[in-house]
Image (cartoon, grey):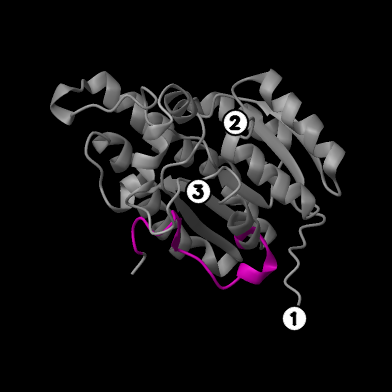
Amino acid sequence: MSLAIELSGKRALITGGGNGIGAEIGRALVRAGAHVWINDISQERASEIATELCAIGPGSASPVKADVTDPAKVLRMREETGPVDILVNNVGIPIGGFQLQKFVDSQPSDWDLSIWLNFGSVLHVTHAYVGAMTEAGFGRVITIVSDAGRKGERYQVIYGAAKAASMGFSRGLAAEVGKFGVTVNCVALGAMKTGPLIDVIANDPAFETKMARPYAVPRIGRTTDPAPLVAFLASDYAEWITGQTYPVDGGYVNAL
């Protein structure tokens, strides 16, 4: 049996889709035929990626600017995009980039920002879109999380807690909406060569080798690694898969 992912006629939204992992997920969904809304806090980034995706086809893409940590702006985004069939909650990074910090040295203001970005955005965006999915009898909610929330990582305590909260939220929501044809899953990532980590490695190339040592597949993640799994989870092939967290992490943390 040929396992070709077919998403023609489906509408998708990817938060934080203007670069890195989000952009690669956008490429995978457009190649499968979906129309993809590329959300970013930067109109320029969103427009640039949307234009690129329209060129690769066979699907298409549109940009939509919104700060997904702001409930009012999320609702305005929902008015602009209309309902979608596939929601990819991709926004989320450790606050402060790759500057790790002990919990005892952190401040409540640091916690609020990390929780708002990495968990609050998942709540707000999902809340805005999942109702129409249940009414339509079809939907896919896929949230990008982190092994920091599965395993626990020193110096990323609040970030890991926010990602763990997204996983718990997804399991509970999956139990609520499964009877309406909506599935809810997470994809957990290890260290990815994107964002602030690119600059760190550029300044210290040996750091990449050091980071890769705990991984069974001895390298850190590429932005292209999660996209095929997200496309699969968005497809009809995954209609009986829900409430799960799938690691794409080179074997850093076992799923079982």
Q: Amino acid at mark 3?
A: Thr
In the displayed structure, would residue 218 be above or below residue 21? below
Q: Which mark is residue 75?
A: 2
Instruction: Tell which residue pokes out farthest to the front in this image.
Output: 206
* Position of residue 22 in the picture relative to residue 96 (left or right): right
In the displayed structure, would residue 191 be above or below residue 79? below
Quickly name the residue at label 1: 1
* Position of residue 159 in the picture relative to residue 142 (left or right): left
Q: Position of residue 74 (x, y in %)?
A: 57, 30
- Magenta region: 233-254
Q: Residues within 10 Å of mark 2 (few under 14, many from 20)?
A: some
The N terminus - image quarter: bottom right
Tag 3–tag 2 contact (CB < 8 Å): no
Q: Name which of mark 1 and mark 2 comes first in the sequence.
A: 1
Residue 134 seen anywhere in this rendered image of the structure: no
Q: Position of residue 181 (x, y in %)?
A: 61, 66
Q: Which mark is residue 124?
A: none
Residue at point 63% right, 56% down?
228
Residue at point 70% right, 18% down?
44
- Callout 1 secondary element: loop
Q: Position of residue 72 (x, y in %)?
A: 54, 25
Residue 37 seen anywhere in this rendered image of the structure: yes
Q: Residues within 10 Å of mark 1 (few under 14, many from 20)?
A: few
Is residue 87 magenta-colored? no
Q: CA distance from mark 1 to mark 2?
A: 42 Å
Q: Which mark is residue 143?
A: 3
Q: Quadrant of residue 27?
A: top right
Is residue 248 magenta-colored? yes
Q: CA distance from mark 3 to mark 2?
A: 19 Å
Q: Amino acid at mark 1?
A: Met
Q: Name which of mark 1 and mark 3 comes first in the sequence.
A: 1
- Residue nearest the viewer, comparing 102 with 40: 102
